[in-house]
Amino acid sequence: MVVKLLRIFAQAWATLVTILILISLSFIWYSEGFAKVQEIMSPFNIINFIVTIISLSPAIGAWALADHLVKKDGVKR
């Protein structure tokens, strides 16, 4: 039961963060143009990468905890 709840939370959190990022990028594209979106999504923009990882960390942690519980207790997914 706990594993299932953790997986649902992880999927919901990752989905919400993804939707938030896409909405934010669309508003930036509308207001400042595609060049600004390219600047933000550049692989050299380390701050954007760090903020994205921090935003997704609850989902990553919940998924990792669910995997750990499955391996530890032998609970079925």
Image: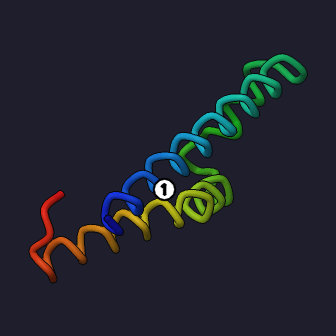
Res 41 quadrant in image: top right
Q: Is residue 36 left or right of residue 62?
A: right
User: Residue 10, percent across and down?
Assistant: 45, 55
Q: Is residue 17 left or right of residue 73?
A: right
Residue at the location (42% across, 67% down)?
62
User: Residue 54, percent across and down?
Assistant: 60, 65
| Quadrant for the N terminus in the image | bottom left
| Quadrant for the C terminus in the image | bottom left
Q: Nearer the viewer, residue 46 or 17?
A: 17
Res 61 quadrant in image: bottom left
Q: Is residue 65 left or right of residue 25?
A: left
As drawn, the residue found furthest toward the right would be 31
69 shown above or below 57 = below
Res 4 quadrant in image: bottom left
Q: Secondary structure at mark 1?
A: helix
Q: Is residue 24 left or right of residue 14?
A: right
Q: Which residue is mark 1?
A: 9
Count the marks: how many? 1
As drawn, the residue found furthest toward the front would be 1
Residue at the location (66% across, 53% down)?
48
Type of the residue with mark 1: Phe
User: Residue 22, percent across and down?
Assistant: 65, 30
Mark 1 surroundings: few (<14), some (14-19) or many (≥20) residues within 10 A: some
User: Residue 67, percent across and down?
Assistant: 24, 68
Residue at the location (42% across, 51% down)?
8
Residue at the location (87% across, 23% down)?
32
73 shown above or below 41 = below
Q: Nearer the viewer, residue 22 or 16?
A: 16
As drawn, the residue found furthest toward the left would be 74
Q: Nearer the viewer, residue 42 or 77?
A: 77
